[in-house]
Image (spheres, rainbow, N blue to C red):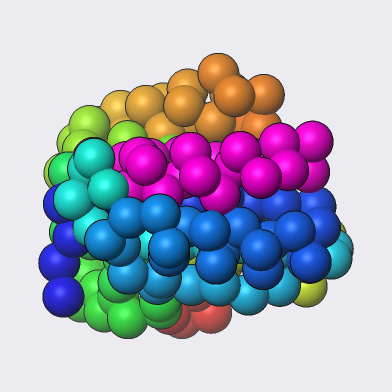
Amino acid sequence: MSYHAIGLIESTSIAQGIAAADAMAKSANVQILIAKSICPGKYIVMIGGDVAAVQQSVDAGGGLSPDVIVDSFVIPNVHPSVLPAISGGTHIENIAAISVIETYSVAATIEATDAAVKAAQVEPIRMHLAFGIGGKSYVILTGEVADIMAATEAGAAVASDKGFLVSKIVIPRPHQQLIDQLL
């Protein structure tokens, strides 16, 4: 199913995150796409729907306990490659240059990915969202060198503007052994 927009709330409280998920579902005509605990004891709720409903839902969930919200977003016109990358359903035939954008929040990685794939002809290979890595998240992108450089800068700028950028790298010619491990 495709959505006009997605929204996410990332909370430091599991209990408040569950309450936010309920408020988000009740406040507007949206679909809960993800509602679960993540490392280190945080909770995320991602919803999809039309832009106004998603905005209303994120506002309702975030307004319950704003003191426990780590990060949030509403992405209108989310790029079609973002949701499959979140769910691990991306299949890439040819890997060219790669880049990694690493952030301190799930929300920042998803926003950075959307910005990157909208900025240049790149594809997300995988997104790792906070499981087993201390709450950090990252995305690995592939494309031609010029595209990957432009996309990485655009995505990293979004995360940096929020104060959540950990690191970014570009590898113009990754070794085949590394590509095999990434896939």
Q: Is residue 74 above or below residue 44?
A: above
In the visual, does 52 lie left or right of 177?
left
Q: Residue furthest top?
A: 161
Residue at figure coordinates x 64%, y 32% from the top left: 165
Q: Is residue 130 above or below residue 107?
A: below
Q: What span is colored magenta in the figure?
A: 54-76
Residue 13 place in picture, x, y as percent: 81, 58
Q: In which quarter of the image is the C terminus?
A: bottom left
Residue 24 place in picture, x, y as percent: 47, 57
Looking at the rendering, which quadrant does residue 29 occupy?
Answer: bottom left
Residue at figure coordinates x 37%, y 27% from the top left: 154
In the visual, does 171 lie left or right of 61?
left
Q: Which of 60 and 163 is in front in this view?
A: 60
Residue at figure coordinates x 63%, y 75% from the top left: 36
Residue at figure coordinates x 48%, y 72% from the top left: 34
Residue 42 place in picture, x, y as percent: 77, 61
* Residue 64 drawn in magenta: yes
